[in-house]
Amino acid sequence: MKGVGALLGAAALWSWHTDLEHWLRTATISWQQSFGQLLAPQVDSAVQIAQQASKNWPLFLLLIVAYASLRFLEAYGLWQDKTWAYWFGVLGYGIFIPIELYYLIVSPFDWFKLAILVLNILIVIVVYRNMKRKGLL
C-alpha cells in the first residue's frame, strides 16, 4: 500500500508541479469545508512539504520513485517468503519508531502521530512473529 501511495504521490507531483500552489489552496479549502480543523497540523505539514517538492520536483520525484521501488521490492520478497524481506520489513519500519517517539514527546500531543507510532510497532511485531514462526531467528 505504501508503494502504491508513493506512486500516486509521484504521479500527482509530475502532473501538477507547475500549478501546485493553486491545487493545494483548493484542496486545503475543500478539506476545511468538509472536516473543519480535523488533522489541521498534518494538512499544513503536507502542504509545506508539497510546496517544497514543487520547487525541487525532479529530486522529489526521484526520491518518491526510489521509496516506492523499495516498498515493492520488500512486498515481492515477502510474497516469495524471502528471509531478507522479513529483515528489511523489521528494519524498514522499526527504524522510524525512535524518531516517532521523539516527536511524540517533544511536540504537543497528537493522536495522528500516536496512531502512526502504534501502527509501525504493530507492523514490526507481526513481521517479527512471522520470522520467529518460520524459524528465521
Image (cartoon, rainbow, N blue to C red):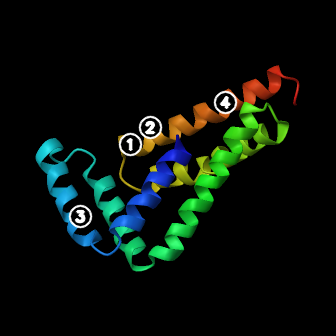
Circles 3 and 2: CB distance less than 8 Å? no
In the foreground, 71 or 91: 71
C-alpha span from label 3 to label 4: 39 Å
Q: Amino acid at mark 2?
A: Ala
Q: Secondary structure at mark 3?
A: helix
Q: Position of residue 50 (x, y in %)?
A: 37, 66
Residue plotted at (50% across, 75% down) = 58
In the foreground, 121 or 52: 52
Q: State which quarter of the image contains the C terminus.
A: top right
Seen from this angle, which residue lies furthest top? 133
Q: Which mark is residue 23?
A: 3
Q: Secondary structure at mark 4?
A: helix
Circles 3 and 4: CB distance less than 8 Å? no
C-alpha span from label 3 to label 2: 28 Å
Circles 2 and 1: CB distance less than 8 Å? yes
Residue tagged 4: 125
Q: Secondary structure at mark 2?
A: helix
C-alpha span from label 2 to label 1: 5 Å
Residue tagged 1: 112
Query: Is 122 left or right of 26, judged from the image as shown?
Result: right
